[in-house]
Image (spheres, rainbow, N blue to C red):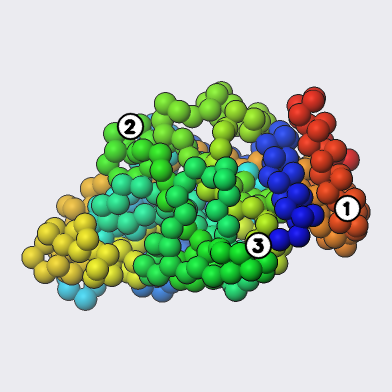
Amino acid sequence: MRNWAKTAAAALSVLRICSAYDIVREYSGSSFFDRWDFYGSWDNLTNGDVWWLDRVNATQQQLAYVNTDGNAIIRVDDTSVVPYNEKRNSIRITTTDSYNYGSLIIIDILHLPFGCSVWPAFWTKGETWPDDGEIDIIEAINLMTSNQMALHTTAGCYHDTPTGQIGQSTGLGPGNVGGTGLNSDGEDATDCSTPSGCVVTETKANSFGSSFAENGGGVWAMQFDIAGVYIWFWPRGEVPVSIEESTSTSSMDLSDWGSPSAAYPNSSCTFEDFFTPQQLVMDITLCGDWAGLAAVYNATCGSSGPTGICYTNNVVGNGSNYADAYFEVSHIRAYTTGVEGIAPTAAFAQTPITTSGAQLTYSHPISGRSEWVAMAWVTLILCMLFGTVVVL
Protein backbone atom coordinates (compact mmCIF):
# COMPACT_ATOMS: atom_id res chain seq x y z
CA MET A 1 0.00 0.00 0.00
CA ARG A 2 1.23 3.53 -0.70
CA ASN A 3 2.74 5.16 2.39
CA TRP A 4 0.49 8.23 2.12
CA ALA A 5 -2.62 6.09 2.34
CA LYS A 6 -1.34 4.14 5.33
CA THR A 7 -0.35 7.35 7.10
CA ALA A 8 -3.65 9.04 6.40
CA ALA A 9 -5.66 6.00 7.44
CA ALA A 10 -3.75 5.77 10.71
CA ALA A 11 -4.20 9.47 11.42
CA LEU A 12 -7.91 9.45 10.63
CA SER A 13 -8.44 6.30 12.69
CA VAL A 14 -7.16 8.19 15.73
CA LEU A 15 -8.99 11.38 14.76
CA ARG A 16 -12.31 9.59 15.09
CA ILE A 17 -12.07 9.75 18.90
CA CYS A 18 -11.01 13.39 19.06
CA SER A 19 -14.34 15.08 18.49
CA ALA A 20 -17.47 15.42 20.55
CA TYR A 21 -20.61 14.31 18.74
CA ASP A 22 -23.82 16.33 18.93
CA ILE A 23 -27.09 14.43 19.26
CA VAL A 24 -29.56 14.83 16.40
CA ARG A 25 -32.14 12.13 17.11
CA GLU A 26 -33.31 9.87 19.95
CA TYR A 27 -35.69 6.95 19.49
CA SER A 28 -37.15 6.16 22.91
CA GLY A 29 -40.23 5.96 25.09
CA SER A 30 -43.74 6.47 23.77
CA SER A 31 -42.46 8.06 20.54
CA PHE A 32 -39.96 5.28 19.74
CA PHE A 33 -41.82 4.01 16.66
CA ASP A 34 -42.82 7.42 15.25
CA ARG A 35 -39.95 7.67 12.76
CA TRP A 36 -39.91 4.06 11.55
CA ASP A 37 -41.59 2.39 8.58
CA PHE A 38 -43.02 -1.13 8.98
CA TYR A 39 -42.20 -3.55 6.17
CA GLY A 40 -45.67 -5.04 5.70
CA SER A 41 -44.76 -8.07 3.58
CA TRP A 42 -43.27 -11.54 3.73
CA ASP A 43 -39.51 -11.92 4.08
CA ASN A 44 -38.54 -11.74 0.43
CA LEU A 45 -34.97 -10.71 1.28
CA THR A 46 -33.56 -13.61 3.30
CA ASN A 47 -36.38 -16.10 2.63
CA GLY A 48 -37.36 -16.42 6.26
CA ASP A 49 -40.63 -18.08 7.25
CA VAL A 50 -42.26 -14.88 8.53
CA TRP A 51 -44.71 -12.16 7.63
CA TRP A 52 -43.31 -8.78 8.64
CA LEU A 53 -46.45 -6.92 9.67
CA ASP A 54 -47.48 -3.39 8.78
CA ARG A 55 -47.84 -0.80 11.55
CA VAL A 56 -51.57 -1.32 12.14
CA ASN A 57 -51.38 -5.09 12.51
CA ALA A 58 -48.12 -4.98 14.46
CA THR A 59 -49.78 -2.68 16.98
CA GLN A 60 -53.02 -4.65 17.15
CA GLN A 61 -51.19 -7.94 17.66
CA GLN A 62 -48.84 -6.43 20.25
CA LEU A 63 -45.71 -7.37 18.32
CA ALA A 64 -44.40 -3.79 18.38
CA TYR A 65 -45.16 -1.64 21.42
CA VAL A 66 -43.68 0.26 24.35
CA ASN A 67 -43.88 -1.57 27.68
CA THR A 68 -44.60 -0.13 31.11
CA ASP A 69 -40.89 0.49 31.68
CA GLY A 70 -40.81 2.73 28.61
CA ASN A 71 -38.78 0.27 26.55
CA ALA A 72 -39.58 -0.64 22.94
CA ILE A 73 -40.56 -4.27 22.35
CA ILE A 74 -40.26 -5.91 18.92
CA ARG A 75 -41.18 -9.57 18.93
CA VAL A 76 -42.19 -12.71 17.07
CA ASP A 77 -45.75 -13.99 17.50
CA ASP A 78 -45.55 -16.61 20.25
CA THR A 79 -49.28 -17.29 20.74
CA SER A 80 -50.72 -18.32 17.35
CA VAL A 81 -50.91 -21.87 16.03
CA VAL A 82 -49.35 -21.80 12.55
CA PRO A 83 -50.50 -24.50 10.08
CA TYR A 84 -48.09 -26.17 7.69
CA ASN A 85 -47.15 -24.04 4.66
CA GLU A 86 -47.99 -20.81 6.51
CA LYS A 87 -45.63 -18.22 7.98
CA ARG A 88 -45.39 -16.78 11.49
CA ASN A 89 -45.87 -13.06 12.10
CA SER A 90 -42.90 -10.91 13.03
CA ILE A 91 -41.53 -7.37 12.67
CA ARG A 92 -39.12 -5.48 10.47
CA ILE A 93 -38.81 -1.69 10.85
CA THR A 94 -36.66 0.88 9.03
CA THR A 95 -36.00 4.48 10.03
CA THR A 96 -37.34 7.32 7.94
CA ASP A 97 -34.07 9.08 8.80
CA SER A 98 -30.84 8.42 6.90
CA TYR A 99 -27.38 9.00 8.36
CA ASN A 100 -24.35 10.10 6.38
CA TYR A 101 -20.61 10.16 7.04
CA GLY A 102 -19.82 11.73 10.38
CA SER A 103 -22.61 9.85 12.16
CA LEU A 104 -22.52 7.87 15.38
CA ILE A 105 -25.28 5.43 16.42
CA ILE A 106 -25.63 4.12 19.99
CA ILE A 107 -28.20 1.49 20.98
CA ASP A 108 -28.93 0.33 24.54
CA ILE A 109 -30.62 -3.09 24.63
CA LEU A 110 -31.91 -5.14 27.55
CA HIS A 111 -32.92 -8.29 25.66
CA LEU A 112 -32.07 -9.80 22.27
CA PRO A 113 -34.16 -12.41 20.41
CA PHE A 114 -32.67 -15.89 20.56
CA GLY A 115 -33.62 -19.54 20.19
CA CYS A 116 -33.73 -22.23 17.53
CA SER A 117 -34.76 -20.80 14.11
CA VAL A 118 -34.50 -17.20 15.40
CA TRP A 119 -32.50 -14.74 13.28
CA PRO A 120 -32.48 -11.17 14.65
CA ALA A 121 -30.51 -8.24 13.29
CA PHE A 122 -29.87 -4.56 13.89
CA TRP A 123 -28.20 -3.14 10.83
CA THR A 124 -28.01 -0.29 8.36
CA LYS A 125 -28.59 -0.06 4.63
CA GLY A 126 -28.40 2.45 1.81
CA GLU A 127 -31.39 3.53 -0.24
CA THR A 128 -30.84 0.76 -2.79
CA TRP A 129 -30.10 -2.53 -1.02
CA PRO A 130 -27.64 -4.18 -1.31
CA ASP A 131 -25.82 -1.93 -3.82
CA ASP A 132 -25.54 1.06 -1.45
CA GLY A 133 -23.86 -0.88 1.34
CA GLU A 134 -24.89 -2.68 4.52
CA ILE A 135 -23.44 -2.53 8.04
CA ASP A 136 -24.43 -5.36 10.39
CA ILE A 137 -24.11 -4.16 13.99
CA ILE A 138 -25.98 -7.04 15.67
CA GLU A 139 -26.65 -10.36 13.95
CA ALA A 140 -26.65 -13.96 15.15
CA ILE A 141 -28.84 -17.05 14.88
CA ASN A 142 -30.24 -20.05 16.71
CA LEU A 143 -28.26 -20.86 19.87
CA MET A 144 -25.12 -18.90 19.03
CA THR A 145 -23.53 -17.20 22.03
CA SER A 146 -21.52 -14.48 20.24
CA ASN A 147 -22.65 -11.60 18.05
CA GLN A 148 -21.33 -11.14 14.54
CA MET A 149 -20.64 -7.80 12.85
CA ALA A 150 -20.11 -7.38 9.11
CA LEU A 151 -19.90 -5.13 6.09
CA HIS A 152 -21.61 -6.04 2.81
CA THR A 153 -20.66 -4.20 -0.37
CA THR A 154 -20.35 -4.52 -4.11
CA ALA A 155 -17.01 -5.79 -5.48
CA GLY A 156 -13.89 -3.84 -4.59
CA CYS A 157 -14.12 -3.33 -0.82
CA TYR A 158 -11.85 -5.42 1.43
CA HIS A 159 -11.12 -5.82 5.12
CA ASP A 160 -7.56 -6.04 6.40
CA THR A 161 -7.76 -6.98 10.08
CA PRO A 162 -6.32 -3.97 11.96
CA THR A 163 -4.20 -4.41 15.07
CA GLY A 164 -6.58 -2.29 17.16
CA GLN A 165 -9.59 -4.55 16.60
CA ILE A 166 -10.44 -6.84 19.51
CA GLY A 167 -12.99 -9.01 17.67
CA GLN A 168 -12.05 -12.04 15.58
CA SER A 169 -12.20 -11.71 11.79
CA THR A 170 -13.80 -14.77 10.25
CA GLY A 171 -15.27 -16.06 7.02
CA LEU A 172 -18.44 -17.37 8.67
CA GLY A 173 -21.77 -15.68 8.30
CA PRO A 174 -25.04 -15.69 6.32
CA GLY A 175 -24.73 -18.34 3.65
CA ASN A 176 -21.87 -19.92 5.58
CA VAL A 177 -19.52 -18.82 2.80
CA GLY A 178 -16.36 -16.92 3.57
CA GLY A 179 -14.32 -15.05 1.02
CA THR A 180 -10.68 -14.03 1.05
CA GLY A 181 -8.71 -12.41 -1.71
CA LEU A 182 -6.23 -9.66 -2.45
CA ASN A 183 -6.92 -5.98 -2.01
CA SER A 184 -5.83 -3.33 -4.51
CA ASP A 185 -2.29 -3.46 -3.12
CA GLY A 186 -1.98 -7.22 -3.47
CA GLU A 187 -2.34 -7.88 0.26
CA ASP A 188 -4.44 -10.65 1.83
CA ALA A 189 -7.88 -9.38 2.80
CA THR A 190 -11.49 -10.45 3.24
CA ASP A 191 -13.74 -9.64 0.29
CA CYS A 192 -16.80 -7.75 1.53
CA SER A 193 -18.78 -8.59 -1.62
CA THR A 194 -19.00 -12.32 -0.81
CA PRO A 195 -22.31 -13.65 0.62
CA SER A 196 -21.00 -13.51 4.18
CA GLY A 197 -19.33 -10.13 3.79
CA CYS A 198 -16.43 -9.06 5.99
CA VAL A 199 -17.40 -10.72 9.27
CA VAL A 200 -15.96 -10.02 12.72
CA THR A 201 -17.08 -12.19 15.65
CA GLU A 202 -17.36 -10.61 19.10
CA THR A 203 -14.84 -11.96 21.62
CA LYS A 204 -16.31 -10.30 24.71
CA ALA A 205 -18.65 -12.45 26.80
CA ASN A 206 -22.44 -12.04 26.89
CA SER A 207 -22.95 -10.54 23.43
CA PHE A 208 -25.84 -12.83 22.40
CA GLY A 209 -28.21 -15.50 23.65
CA SER A 210 -29.58 -16.13 27.11
CA SER A 211 -26.45 -14.83 28.82
CA PHE A 212 -26.93 -11.39 27.25
CA ALA A 213 -30.27 -10.90 29.00
CA GLU A 214 -29.11 -12.55 32.22
CA ASN A 215 -26.27 -10.03 32.37
CA GLY A 216 -28.67 -7.10 32.00
CA GLY A 217 -28.11 -6.49 28.32
CA GLY A 218 -25.53 -4.17 26.83
CA VAL A 219 -24.69 -1.29 24.53
CA TRP A 220 -23.44 -1.11 20.94
CA ALA A 221 -22.04 1.89 19.10
CA MET A 222 -21.31 2.26 15.39
CA GLN A 223 -19.30 5.07 13.86
CA PHE A 224 -19.84 5.74 10.15
CA ASP A 225 -17.02 7.85 8.79
CA ILE A 226 -14.94 8.39 5.66
CA ALA A 227 -12.01 7.14 7.76
CA GLY A 228 -13.85 3.85 8.28
CA VAL A 229 -16.62 2.01 10.10
CA TYR A 230 -16.05 1.10 13.76
CA ILE A 231 -18.30 -0.95 16.04
CA TRP A 232 -18.03 -1.21 19.83
CA PHE A 233 -19.83 -3.50 22.27
CA TRP A 234 -19.97 -3.30 26.06
CA PRO A 235 -21.86 -5.80 28.23
CA ARG A 236 -23.76 -4.30 31.14
CA GLY A 237 -21.30 -3.36 33.86
CA GLU A 238 -18.61 -2.36 31.35
CA VAL A 239 -20.37 0.52 29.60
CA PRO A 240 -18.16 3.65 29.49
CA VAL A 241 -18.97 6.52 31.82
CA SER A 242 -19.45 8.84 28.84
CA ILE A 243 -22.39 6.68 27.72
CA GLU A 244 -23.76 5.85 31.17
CA GLU A 245 -23.98 9.53 32.08
CA SER A 246 -25.29 10.73 28.71
CA THR A 247 -28.78 12.13 28.26
CA SER A 248 -31.13 12.72 25.36
CA THR A 249 -29.64 16.20 24.88
CA SER A 250 -25.96 15.82 25.75
CA SER A 251 -23.06 15.45 23.34
CA MET A 252 -20.92 12.30 23.22
CA ASP A 253 -17.17 12.00 23.82
CA LEU A 254 -15.49 8.81 22.59
CA SER A 255 -12.20 9.20 24.47
CA ASP A 256 -13.00 6.58 27.16
CA TRP A 257 -14.30 3.93 24.77
CA GLY A 258 -11.18 1.87 24.20
CA SER A 259 -10.61 -0.33 21.15
CA PRO A 260 -13.56 -1.28 18.93
CA SER A 261 -14.78 -4.84 18.56
CA ALA A 262 -14.80 -4.45 14.78
CA ALA A 263 -12.69 -1.97 12.83
CA TYR A 264 -13.02 -1.40 9.10
CA PRO A 265 -10.52 1.35 8.22
CA ASN A 266 -10.48 2.91 4.76
CA SER A 267 -7.06 1.43 3.97
CA SER A 268 -8.66 -1.26 1.78
CA CYS A 269 -12.09 0.22 1.11
CA THR A 270 -12.85 3.69 -0.23
CA PHE A 271 -16.10 4.05 1.65
CA GLU A 272 -17.65 6.85 -0.39
CA ASP A 273 -17.55 4.48 -3.39
CA PHE A 274 -19.55 1.78 -1.59
CA PHE A 275 -21.81 3.42 0.99
CA THR A 276 -24.54 6.03 0.62
CA PRO A 277 -26.43 7.53 3.61
CA GLN A 278 -27.64 4.68 5.80
CA GLN A 279 -31.03 3.90 7.35
CA LEU A 280 -31.33 1.89 10.57
CA VAL A 281 -33.11 -1.46 10.35
CA MET A 282 -34.28 -3.83 13.10
CA ASP A 283 -35.90 -7.15 12.29
CA ILE A 284 -36.49 -10.74 13.35
CA THR A 285 -36.88 -13.48 10.78
CA LEU A 286 -37.12 -17.25 11.23
CA CYS A 287 -35.11 -19.98 9.50
CA GLY A 288 -34.29 -18.53 6.08
CA ASP A 289 -31.01 -18.48 4.17
CA TRP A 290 -28.77 -18.66 7.24
CA ALA A 291 -30.58 -19.90 10.36
CA GLY A 292 -32.45 -22.49 8.31
CA LEU A 293 -29.52 -24.01 6.44
CA ALA A 294 -29.48 -27.70 7.36
CA ALA A 295 -25.83 -27.86 8.40
CA VAL A 296 -26.01 -24.59 10.33
CA TYR A 297 -29.33 -25.37 12.01
CA ASN A 298 -28.38 -28.90 13.02
CA ALA A 299 -25.09 -27.74 14.52
CA THR A 300 -26.92 -26.31 17.55
CA CYS A 301 -30.62 -27.12 17.11
CA GLY A 302 -30.80 -30.53 15.46
CA SER A 303 -32.18 -32.16 18.58
CA SER A 304 -34.81 -29.48 19.21
CA GLY A 305 -37.56 -31.28 17.31
CA PRO A 306 -38.54 -34.52 15.60
CA THR A 307 -37.67 -33.64 11.99
CA GLY A 308 -34.31 -31.89 12.09
CA ILE A 309 -35.82 -29.27 9.77
CA CYS A 310 -35.91 -25.66 10.95
CA TYR A 311 -39.40 -24.81 9.66
CA THR A 312 -41.28 -27.91 10.80
CA ASN A 313 -39.48 -28.10 14.13
CA ASN A 314 -40.22 -24.51 15.09
CA VAL A 315 -42.43 -22.29 12.94
CA VAL A 316 -45.30 -24.75 12.50
CA GLY A 317 -47.57 -25.36 15.48
CA ASN A 318 -47.85 -23.33 18.64
CA GLY A 319 -45.42 -20.52 19.31
CA SER A 320 -44.34 -21.39 22.83
CA ASN A 321 -40.72 -21.77 21.74
CA TYR A 322 -40.64 -18.08 20.76
CA ALA A 323 -41.07 -16.68 24.26
CA ASP A 324 -37.52 -15.29 24.07
CA ALA A 325 -37.73 -14.06 20.47
CA TYR A 326 -37.93 -10.34 21.19
CA PHE A 327 -35.91 -7.13 21.35
CA GLU A 328 -36.28 -4.90 24.39
CA VAL A 329 -34.65 -1.57 23.58
CA SER A 330 -34.11 1.24 26.06
CA HIS A 331 -33.16 3.78 23.39
CA ILE A 332 -31.26 4.50 20.21
CA ARG A 333 -29.37 7.78 19.84
CA ALA A 334 -27.90 9.25 16.68
CA TYR A 335 -25.10 11.83 16.74
CA THR A 336 -23.12 13.84 14.22
CA THR A 337 -19.93 15.87 14.31
CA GLY A 338 -18.45 18.60 12.15
CA VAL A 339 -15.24 16.57 11.80
CA GLU A 340 -16.22 13.74 9.48
CA GLY A 341 -12.66 12.96 8.46
CA ILE A 342 -10.81 15.06 5.92
CA ALA A 343 -12.23 14.54 2.45
CA PRO A 344 -9.81 12.96 -0.02
CA THR A 345 -10.65 15.29 -2.93
CA ALA A 346 -11.54 18.95 -3.21
CA ALA A 347 -14.76 18.21 -5.09
CA PHE A 348 -16.06 15.88 -2.40
CA ALA A 349 -14.69 18.08 0.35
CA GLN A 350 -16.95 20.96 -0.63
CA THR A 351 -20.13 18.90 -0.99
CA PRO A 352 -22.69 19.50 1.79
CA ILE A 353 -24.33 16.41 3.25
CA THR A 354 -27.44 16.13 5.36
CA THR A 355 -28.11 13.79 8.27
CA SER A 356 -31.58 13.75 9.80
CA GLY A 357 -32.14 17.43 9.26
CA ALA A 358 -28.72 18.51 10.53
CA GLN A 359 -26.48 19.85 7.73
CA LEU A 360 -22.88 18.73 7.90
CA THR A 361 -20.53 20.55 5.57
CA TYR A 362 -17.05 19.43 4.68
CA SER A 363 -14.84 22.51 4.72
CA HIS A 364 -11.46 21.14 3.69
CA PRO A 365 -10.87 22.01 0.00
CA ILE A 366 -7.57 20.13 -0.02
CA SER A 367 -6.63 18.35 -3.22
CA GLY A 368 -2.99 17.39 -2.70
CA ARG A 369 -2.37 14.10 -0.91
CA SER A 370 0.62 15.48 1.02
CA GLU A 371 -1.49 18.41 2.26
CA TRP A 372 -4.28 16.02 3.22
CA VAL A 373 -1.95 13.87 5.30
CA ALA A 374 -0.34 16.95 6.83
CA MET A 375 -3.74 18.33 7.85
CA ALA A 376 -4.66 14.99 9.41
CA TRP A 377 -1.52 14.96 11.52
CA VAL A 378 -1.87 18.62 12.55
CA THR A 379 -5.42 17.96 13.68
CA LEU A 380 -4.32 14.83 15.53
CA ILE A 381 -1.57 16.69 17.41
CA LEU A 382 -3.96 19.48 18.39
CA CYS A 383 -6.42 16.88 19.57
CA MET A 384 -3.82 15.16 21.74
CA LEU A 385 -2.67 18.47 23.23
CA PHE A 386 -5.98 20.18 23.82
CA GLY A 387 -8.69 17.54 23.68
CA THR A 388 -11.68 18.13 21.44
CA VAL A 389 -10.78 19.96 18.23
CA VAL A 390 -13.16 21.33 15.63
CA VAL A 391 -11.51 21.82 12.25
CA LEU A 392 -13.03 24.80 10.44
Vertical relation: 128 (above or below) 168: below
Where is residue 315 shown, x and y percent of the image? 21, 64
Where is residue 189 shown, x and y percent of the image? 56, 63
> Nearer the N terminus, badge 3 or badge 1?
3
Q: Residue, x 78% and y 31% (percent of image)? A: 383
Residue 45 sits in quarter: bottom left
Where is residue 226 shown, x and y percent of the image? 71, 54
As drawn, is 130 to the left or to the right of 120?
A: right
As drawn, is 318 to the left or to the right of 77?
A: left
Q: Could you give the CA–CA distance between mark 2 and mark 1, rounded to whole angstroms?
A: 49 Å
Question: Given the image, on which type of amino acid does mark 2 rest?
Answer: Asn
Q: Could you give the CA–CA distance between mark 3 and mark 1, rounded to whole angstroms?
A: 20 Å
Residue that label 3 marks: 269
Residue that label 2 marks: 215
Q: Residue, x 67% and y 66% (percent of image)? A: 185
Residue that label 1 marks: 370
Q: Dot 3: few (<14), some (14–19), or many (≥20) neighbours within 10 Å?
A: many
